[in-house]
Image: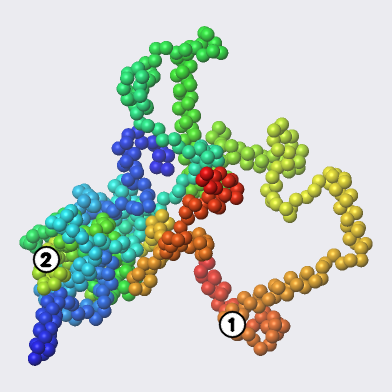
Amino acid sequence: LIYCCRKPKTKRAKRFLEKREPKLNENTKNAMLIKGGNANLTVTEVLKDIYAVKKPFAVLYKRKNITRPFEDQTSLEFFSKKSDCSLFLFGSHNKKRPNNLVIGRMFDYHVLDMIELGVEKFVSLKDIKNSKCPEGTKPMLIFAGDVFDVNEEYRRLKSLLIDFFRGPTVPSIRLAGLEYVLHFTAVDGKIYMRSYKVLLKKSGCKIPRIELEEMGPSLDLVMRRTHLASDDLYKLSLKQPKGLKPKKKKNISHDVFGTTYGRIHMQKQDLSKLLTRKMKGLRKRPAKKSAEDGGTTPKKSKPD
Amino acid sequence: MAAVRVESVLAAAEEQEAEKRRSITVEKELELEYDLGNLLAVDRNPPPAAALRGAGPRREALLQALARDNTQLLVSRLWELPAERAGGAGGPLVAQLPEPTFRLPREKPPPKPRPPTRWEQFARLKGIRRKKKTSLVWDEQAKEWRRRWGYRRAGGDPSRAWLAEVPAGADPEEDQFARLRREKRERVARNELNRLRNLARAHRAGRAVPAAPLHPTGHQDRDELRRVAGVARVSTASLGRFQPRLPKEPAEPPSRSGGKKRRFEPLLGNLAAERSRQLELLRDMGSKKPVLDITRAVNKQLRQEEAEAAAANKGKKQSKRGKRGRRQQQPGRSGKKSGARRQQKPAGGGTGGR
């Protein structure tokens, strides 16, 4: 279907289009970080820090774009289509909404959810003079606070933040490389986002003791407006295709204790002909054989 | 003596173990929820709101302590996963992560399988399977392996062919090179047309296009022409009964209100069939035997009633009144409740339907 308008003339163009088409197992979501018409220094710094955290799965737009996400979503959708990004973070500032961040995600290049957050306090990466962890580390995400489960808007915000900061899905991870943790606490109508570098110290046993060192951007956020998708659209976006379900292996079952049972299907056996032990006396001998077919074709019953 | 010493040794060892474990144990009221595939932990314990409301540094310290505890729990879980040394004995310790369980929305809708093209349908019907072709072909002239098609193909460059044989039954005056060029152009155009048609079919199948988009003349496809011709035929005053047909058009059009029930026989058609039908009718009217088989009808009714009763009594207790009493009671059952429900329903339906 991607080839309906223009057939790609080079292999590179074909690969480019195939990367963007819908697939069973999707690519890692890219984020676009956009500055609004009147973005101030704080908001710009926030965007730059988040870009540093999310590299290489983020695009930071250098120029200011005069749009209002909550009124008109067409320009966001246009950007998303052009850069193949399904997450976005839009920063702006005005008197009514100072230090405004709109975090959102797309489904099929249309806006799915958008949540507006106000930044009350921001400590940047360069303000904290500590050693940083390498770029592209998969962060550990921790959400603290019962509000994240009780309130519907907070639940969507949690889902959005996980989607945003998750990074690529990997089958295995190097245990010594668990260096980065993002901790979100929801208390008193505020959300505290802190990033720490993880130091693994020796403890007596195999599991190391954790010490944390503050690093990286820390934000104090307040939830402002929201634009959440309707329930059925959200359910539609959650739908996974059938091909992704792991195929059930037939004839294998597990019980409560962890024992694996297998089933073997056999043909019907004649139990009277089952051989249990080697009985030498019952073995077929050549003399016996000639005596059996002696009745049909008598060749030489006795040596002459 | 020895027994006491052994016990004391064991107790001391256990205490040492506990001491070691103390550095990594964390006490929490509610257990955290883990999604190890996403390296995610969710803590449902309400954070100490009063303490966090305070001033800056104390709040930071508290947040850091909370984060340390939660991270310790998450890392303990991660360390318990089955791990192995990647790349031999000296390599890093790598743990196998399970599948992520937290459901996140997709980026794009899942791909729809495209419908098979005309050739694919034909091949499936005939049982034709794809022959795997080698990428290189032996070129006898150049005595080496060359590509099947493309740059430096086997068989030389077709644009530089200097000889074109005149085929057996062809006109000797005809320009063979021009003919070859024309045929290639036609082939390319036909392939392109078929490709676009297959795409359009796939696109239409995906979208379930409604049955009447009218394209301008020259851009209509076979099905649309047939449909439009049918509509034009029926748009006369006599609803198309006296319209002449083309030689190969089917005589009786498939009726749109189709099927068995609205099929009418023509008035002066099959005289023999009409005669036999009328005679059969007279026979049935005149015979003494009833047309309705009473026993069969009664059995059918009984079976139906039993099925209904079984369905109704699933989970419900048998009422004392018996079958007849129950049947009589059903329409007006529990009048108050149904009345109230009937009142509620329109209001709910009204606002819901809008």
Q: Residue at x 36, y 19 (%)?
A: B140
Q: Which numbered marker is on residue A109?
A: none
Discs 2 and 1 lie in a common subunit: no
Place of residue A14 in the rendered image (x, y in percent of width and height, measured from the top left)? 34, 39
Give the quadrant of the N terminus of chain B: bottom left
Q: Residue at x 74, y 37 (%)?
A: B243
Q: Are marks 2 and 1 in contact (CB under 8 Å)?
A: no
The one of A241 and B13 positioned closer to us in this rendering: B13
Say which quarter of the image contains residue A48.
bottom left
Say which quarter of the image contains residue A179.
bottom left
Residue topped by disc 2 = A199
Report helix, strand or loop for mark 1. loop
Q: Residue at x 66, y 74 (%)?
A: B307
Residue topped by disc 1 = B316
- Name, please, the residue furthest toward the left: A129
Q: Residue at x 68, y 48 (%)?
A: B256
The CA span between labels 2 and 1 is 64 Å
Instruction: Tell me if residue A29 can be seen.
Output: yes
Q: Is residue B3 left or right of residue B166?
A: left
Place of residue B286 in the rendered image (x, y in percent of width and height, measured from the top left)? 93, 62
Going by the numbered disc 2, the residue's amino acid type is Leu
